[in-house]
Amino acid sequence: MRAIVTVIGKDQVGIIAAVCALLSEKNVNVLDISQTILQEYFTMTMLVDVSQATIPFAALKEALAAAGQDRGLDIRIQREDIFDAMHRI
Amino acid sequence: MLNSKDILSTIRMIDQQHLDVRTITMGISLLDCCDPDPAAACRKIYDKITTSAEKLVQTGQDIETEFGIPIVNKRISVTPIALVAGASRTGDYVPFAQAMDKAAKAVGVNFIGGFSALVQKGMTEGDKKLITAIPEALAVTDVVCSSVNMGSTKAGINMDAVRLMGEVIKATADRTADRGGFGCAKLVVFCNAVEDNPFMAGAFHGVGEAERVINVGVSGPGVVHHALQSVKGQPFDVVAETIKKTAFQVTRMGQLVAQEASARLNVPFGIVDLSLAPTPAIGDSVARILEEMGLEVCGTHGTTAALALLNDAVKKGGVMASSSVGGLSGAFIPVSEDEGMIAAAQSGALTLDKLEAMTCVCSVGLDMIAVPGDTPAATISAIIADEAAIGMVNTKTTAVRIIPAPGKRVGDMVEFGGLLGSAPVMPCHTGSAQDFVARGGRIPAPMHSLKN
């Protein structure tokens, strides 16, 4: 199952490293990353494969949100299908 | 990979523009629960609901977690109870409502609809008993919703039922006077009721439906409002196109959730209802969409035209996004549930007469309107008759959900809380309709009902 991770918040050192480390720890494979700075705000979207993840989806979602909270970032994970449905015919 | 801009736009819709799935409603047929013994029938009803919907709430929560889209309500609709209870040897239908209430609470849904009767052409003994039981049933239960269909384009308007419903609404308000007449917020009177509506209080599982079915109601007034802010001052063609595009996106999301819920629960997918359902939250208002089109306040001249465009564009945008569109599909205008409508009604700009005109072009009818507690039953019946006439002649669904708030006068507020919001008490005309309503009988169906 593929999902989209989005990270939004104030730019700081080590955001990508921290998120990737957490995903790797849970055996989530990163397929693609896109990142930009918009008006000092860091926004990153990642396409990931969670089919081999070592924890359930809900737990992964919580772990990412908690990691984000520590750094003042909004980190979420949602199944890719929702974006496909809304933006692709 | 998907475009980051698209991903972030979806996230903004959810975070800032109140995009959500308003309800996943499971329709359950109770036709096999009929029993001459009313206690046995109630037991069967409880068992059927709790077995069928056992995993409904959990499944809704799982989908919410995985897709990151809020699913605000999980609900149940059942076969109109008058049809089921009619087989039982009893004059008291309140226990049937209690069985529904208990079952709904056991599975954790927040409303169950179907304490209903379909009497557009005439009333059976069962229908009469059910209608008589409504005030008590809504007072002693918490999550049961009731509806009565008393007119249709095919059958005309059953004026005996209309007269009766005026009295029932008054009695329901009195029985729940301690809660501002809250019982009436759970009671809808319809003309041309639909059998697959997922929205409360008017949801029931029609007899033409399957054993069980999943219907989904999407929403998104905030998303439409936000989209229109980017086309300020542009012609209506652009406005219509913008609404259509937004409705398409919102409906695709609803279709995805509906299919997912249907597959996980192993229950056939019924329809997606593309309604713009407002909430009392700031930024989730249908009235503010109409104002965004250039009106100083909702209710002023131009409001009906703006609503007609909105209602039509929502349907056109959504219809291609779902394999099966149904229910009410359009724009709702419940006064107490819409922050902009509340403000407009409080300022006096939005009147009952204007709302009646708006119901000619919106998806349903006079919804969540509080009137003074001393409004006579005949006046309420006459309001229902007017609304039913609009539905009958225009071949559309119309409804009345009106609260004659006990002890309240024009200008007072009635608080219902939660999604039901708060309603300013609005004035109605004081000229009597007593003799009109007392006639009874049936208003014949219009000429265009003879289509065959």
Image (cartoon, rainbow, N blue to C red):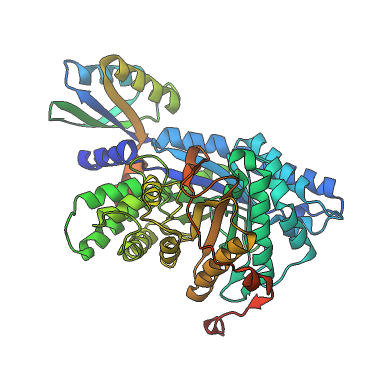
User: Residue A75, image x and y in percent?
Assistant: 30, 25
State the count of labels: 0
The vertical placement of A13 against B404, above or below, is above
- The answer to whether one can see residue B79 in this image is no
User: Residue A12, image x and y in percent?
Assistant: 17, 17
- Residue located at (62% from left, 60% from top): B209
Nearer the observer, B373 or B296: B373
Please identify the quarter of the rendering in which residue B245 is found.
bottom left
- The answer to whether one can see residue B412 in this image is yes
Q: In the rendered view, does B114 fall on the left or right side of B315? A: right
Nearer the observer, B208 or B417: B417
User: Residue A29, image x and y in percent?
Assistant: 31, 27
Image quadrant holding the N terminus of chain A, namely top left
The vertical placement of B238 against B72, above or below, is below
Nearer the observer, B264 or B26: B26
The vertical placement of A44 against B177, above or below, is above
Please identify the quarter of the rendering in which residue B20 is found.
top left
The vertical placement of B262 against B86, above or below, is above
Nearer the observer, B347 or B270: B347
User: Residue B307, image x and y in percent?
Assistant: 35, 61
Q: In the rendered view, does B302 fall on the left or right side of B395? A: left
- Residue located at (57% from left, 54% from top): B202
Q: In the rendered view, does B372 fall on the left or right side of B331? A: right
Image quadrant holding the C terminus of chain A, namely bottom left
- Residue located at (76% from left, 66% from top): B124
